[in-house]
Amino acid sequence: MYDVVIVGAGVSGCAIARELARYDASVCVIERAEDVCCGTSKANSAIVHAGFDAQPGSLMAKLNVEGNRLMYEWARELNFAVLPVGSLVVCVSEETRPGLDELLARGQANGVPDLRIVERDELLAMEPNIADEAVAALWAPTGGIVDPFGLTVALAENAAANGVDFRFNAAVTAVERTSAGWAVHAGDDVVEARAVVNAAGVYADELHGMFVALADGSPASEAVPTVAAEPLQIVPRKGEYYLLDTTAGAHVRHTVFMLPTAMGKGVLVSPTVHGNLIVGPTATDIEDKEAVNTTPAGLAEVASKCSLTVKDVPLREVITTFAGLRAHQEKHDFVIGEVAGTRGLFDCAAIESPGLTSAPAIGVMVSSMVATRLGLAHKPEGSFDPTRPGVVNLAITSFDDWDELCRQDSKFGNIICRCCRVSEAQIVDVIHRNPAATSLDAIKRRTGATMGRCQGGFCTPKIMEILERELGVDASEVTKRGPGSELVVGRNKDRLPQPAGALEGGDAR
């Protein structure tokens, strides 16, 4: 029996968990996948939005600006990578210049600091590879780039260190009303709680429907915002991307946006915190909530549109392509609050862009709502630890510091992933953290191993051997991303016909 169950271990769910850990409450996070950060949070633009795009007065606008401010504070506490590189929204014709003025006014209304329009000469000095057609841009110095894997993992680890439980491979199949609140059937377990937070990403509408079917008309609290108990429809909006090698990472210095349209902010070109260059996304509404495949048409669109703002993008340096799904809702605003007539159910739904940036503010807002509704008190001062030790990043570690690490643990000298300079010590570290990295993708999200130019071609077998050893499992039990993604189906020698007279155990001496 918990006070609160959070469904969904993406960046919003983990931020809520971390903030609820400040209260004297028992909290559990349920996730259908095998790890945190397996949905929208793992496949996006990795941008810290300044907050000039959302409509003034919307929840999206408020939480974007507040989340931007908190992001840099939380990075210092939780040791994840974020860089305030700033962003530029590029205008490529005088006819569309009014769009920049509109964005400037909108951003100022939203409280975004230090916004201004830069003209062609200054823009060219800031971005030498800007398109020849560019005439001006909106400059937002508070924009930035972040490691979405590192952010989500850091939130989960800090939540766990402060008492939050995590349950993986636990898809919600049914819910029930109980005298105390709710019973959630998740995987092979039934988890009871006084309150449930629906942070299920593209599946938030389905979870919302399960609970609303059991609505009892319970009175709302005037102290807590509410959302309607009407059906919620989430439309998966697919975005396809190119990721370029670190050799192309300096092609732009800032995040370069196109002027936005009704379908979103358009194709961007941006450096990443890992030194790569990211180009994308598309924006295509689809029906399949698992369709994270890339398409020839989508990638061709990205290749065509990126040249509108940045010239000579070196797409020959592509090392991988990927697609993610945004949880789009028709009103294009976040849906956050207690569901009317359904006491104890809190929606945190339709968290599309700028959801990643807004996550810290979402965590604070939702945790406060739940605490108010349940009458939770803060833990005694000093009993919540807001800090989290980061994972060593040898790619930015000096040789002197690296030498000292090797003296402390020789495994730091055994480089497993050569592309991203990831050692055995780092991989062992994340396997034994909480939540633990127990798959290849989980290790990738925490250390960067397999994310380089060879995309795991050299290091995958070595990582599998480390997982076997540290988890005490057979190679056939090691997975890429949880049950059903095993890489080894058998051993060649076991499949060979044994010669006549072979000794027990396959020894043919």
Image (cartoon, helix red, strand yellow):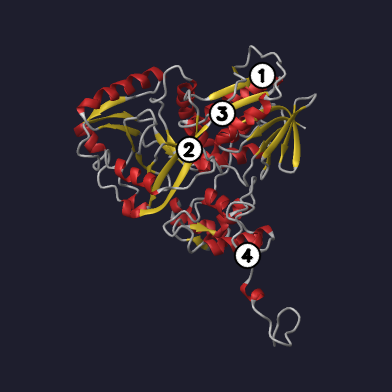
Q: Which amino acid does label 2 sit on?
A: Ile
User: Please, what is the three-letter code of the amino acid marked with disc 1?
Assistant: Thr
The first of marks 1 and 2 along the sequence is 2
Between the residue at mark 1 and the residue at mark 2, the CA separation in whole angstroms equals: 37 Å
Q: Mark 3 points at which residue?
A: 349
Looking at the image, residue 37 lies above or below residue 67? below
In the picture, the quarter occupied by the N terminus is: top right
Local crowd at mark 4 within 10 Å, few (<14), some, or many (≥20)?
few
- Ranked by sequence position, the earlier of labels 4 and 3 is 3
Q: Real-space Cα distance between discs 4 and 3? A: 39 Å
**Looking at the image, is 131 positioned above or below residue 486?**
above
Q: Find disc 1 in the rendering and name its residue.
A: 372
| Residue at disc 3, secondary structure | strand
Mark whose residue sits in front, 1 or 2: 2
Please name which of the two marks, 2 or 4, marks the residue nearer to the observer: 2
Residue situated furthest right in the rendering? 179
Q: Mark 2 points at which residue?
A: 286
Do the CB atoms of the residues marked 3 and 1 lie less than 8 Å apart?
A: no
Name the front one of labels 2 and 3: 2
Q: Which mark is residue 489?
A: 4
Task: Residue 381: give x, y in percent of width and height.
Answer: 67, 27
